[in-house]
Image: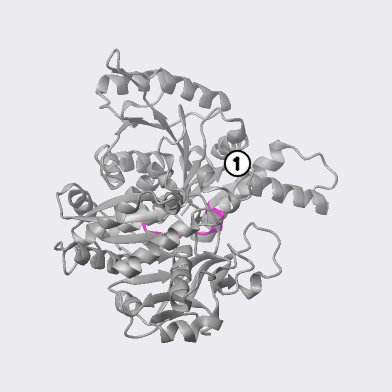
Amino acid sequence: MTTKYIFITGGVVSSVGKGVTAAAIGRLLKERGLKVAVQKLDPYINVDPGTMSPYQHGEVFVLDDGAETDLDLGHYERFIDIRLNRVCNITTGQVYAEVISKERRGDFLGGTIQVIPHITNEIKRRIALVSKSTGADVVLVEVGGTVGDIESLPFLEALRQLRTDLGRENTAYIHVTWLPYIGATDELKTKPTQHSVHELRSIGISPDMIIARSDQPVYDNLREKIAQFCDVEKRAVIPMTTVSTLYEIPLLLEKEKVAEYLLERLSLQSKKEPNWHVWETLVTETKRKKPKVTIALVGKYVELHDAYISVREALKHAALALGVDLDLKWVHSTNLEKGKGLEVFDKVSGIVVPGGFGSRGIEGKILAAHLARTRKIPYFGLCLGMQLMVVEFGRYVLGTDQVNSSEFDPATPNPVIDLMAEQQEIKEMGGTMRLGLYPCILQSGTIAAKAYGAKKIEERHRHRFEFNNQYRDLFASKGMVFSGLSPDKKLVEIAELRDHPFMLGTQFHPEFLSRPTRPHPLFMAFMRAAAEKAGVEYLDPPLPLE
């Protein structure tokens, strides 16, 4: 079967929801029995987001093969329930680095290197790698940014060429735009969408479908106007009104017959009837009034919720399955260091400390771990959150504050968290951490083993520092249980406390493998413990979602 391609562009404003739209369309096609893969084209010149500040880019999403990618790949994996690989995220930096490397080797035989054809050919080559590596029937390709951005032009030119290269019958273009609302006149305006489509057509791309995002209802007269001025069929103008939960979007697109249009446009046949029962259950449960469980997420980037998007979604997945309502409190760790905001811990039933880098706000996170331990509040530490749980416990065990991670205090006399041996000589920051999927052996009878119901697991990592094994025996004698170890037993992957309802940290990032229909077992165990702390009833067994 010839691979079909759907190219998704954005107009009017950024952050219009292209990533969620691509993920939702992917789910529609998967429900019809098609194998789907998704690729993100990021116009920035960084090689990947791994060295970028979360304030600049939000979360870095890590794949099985260790690729550090855009957070939209998290949407793709969660919605479609697939596992992607490194070819599914392209950046301008990667493209230019590859072309320049070839030029330095003499591959172009002394020719002048130009955007067309050399850069566009490299983009097209990388797009083709997705179908080769995944065997997908349909590849959805999302272009980051907004039409009109100078950085996006080489990508858009490559997509224009692909209609000729692959054939019109094998390519479709979807443009996602925003309809601004003018309160003074109580109307939605289509003119920005018209201008955006005009800009896209001036590049040589005519959209087959327009998805019109709006906070207000989009009525038929506006659909007709957009269809007329943008030269698309009326049935291919799809209103997408803002909804209360992201998981409602596939149902909204299903109602608008988006899949039927795309199958017809690409001469594809559905292999099975879609079954939306689970997604309808998810949406119904989201809207149903349920007992509340309050969780504090203690981070240093909490002003930008996208910095912790996978953690937030994993908590939501578990809460939905247990029939409780997640009340998430965003707590800035630097405020805790100043004695501000401590009253929140009087009201929460669980504390999550996620990953991060740098010394800012670290003592605030350690304080959160201390309050969780001493007040018996369920605690879940993710990567850095596990390391700081160890630091706090070390200070309590050794009776001194001269305990730290060598990441934050290289001269600490008690580096209970230290740089991994294989990281000692590494100088470059990008893509050099312990990245990707690694195995872990669970110790029977522990909270972790009971949660997973397995002996061996595999989880995604992103770190340079690890538990210092010089302290393993001492910590174990004082009540810390090393419930997950690498197969050679050299690396601590999971630590938990014996005399605590739930105080557990993971060196890996379990949030990356949580799915709305398959909540991660550790998040489920944490939310159960938090519900019990809150004294609220939860579903046991949990809601069946598969």
Relative to residue 204, is residue 339 drawn left or right? left
Q: Which residues are magenta?
A: 81-88
Rendered residue at 44%/59% (across/down): 365
Badge count: 1
Rendered residue at 72%/47% (across/down): 99
Kindly tell me whether residue 129 is visible in this rendering: yes
Q: Quickly name the residue at label 1.
A: 44
Is residue 462 shown in magenta?
no
Q: Is residue 238 above or below residue 387?
A: above
The one of 404 and 28 positioned closer to us in this rendering: 404
Kindly tell me whether residue 516 is visible in this rendering: no
Relative to residue 137, is residue 402 drawn left or right? right
Q: Is residue 482 above or below residue 353?
A: below
The one of 161 and 48 positioned closer to us in this rendering: 48
Q: Residues within 10 Å of mark 1 (few under 14, many from 20)?
A: some
The one of 470 and 380 positioned closer to us in this rendering: 470
The one of 478 and 166 positioned closer to us in this rendering: 478
The percent position of residue 53, horizontal first and vertical second, equals 55, 47
Dominant secondary-structure state across the stretch colored magenta: loop
Where does the C terminus fall, quadrant-wise? bottom left
The percent position of residue 176, horizontal first and vertical second, equals 41, 33
Residue with the most extreme top position: 185
Rendered residue at 14%/49% (across/down): 289
Task: Indicate the colouring scheme.
Answer: one colour
The percent position of residue 288, horizontal first and vertical second, equals 15, 49
Rendered residue at 30%/57% (across/down): 345
The percent position of residue 205, horizontal first and vertical second, equals 52, 30
Amino acid type of the residue that numbered disc 1 sits on in the rendered structure = Tyr
Label 1 element class = loop
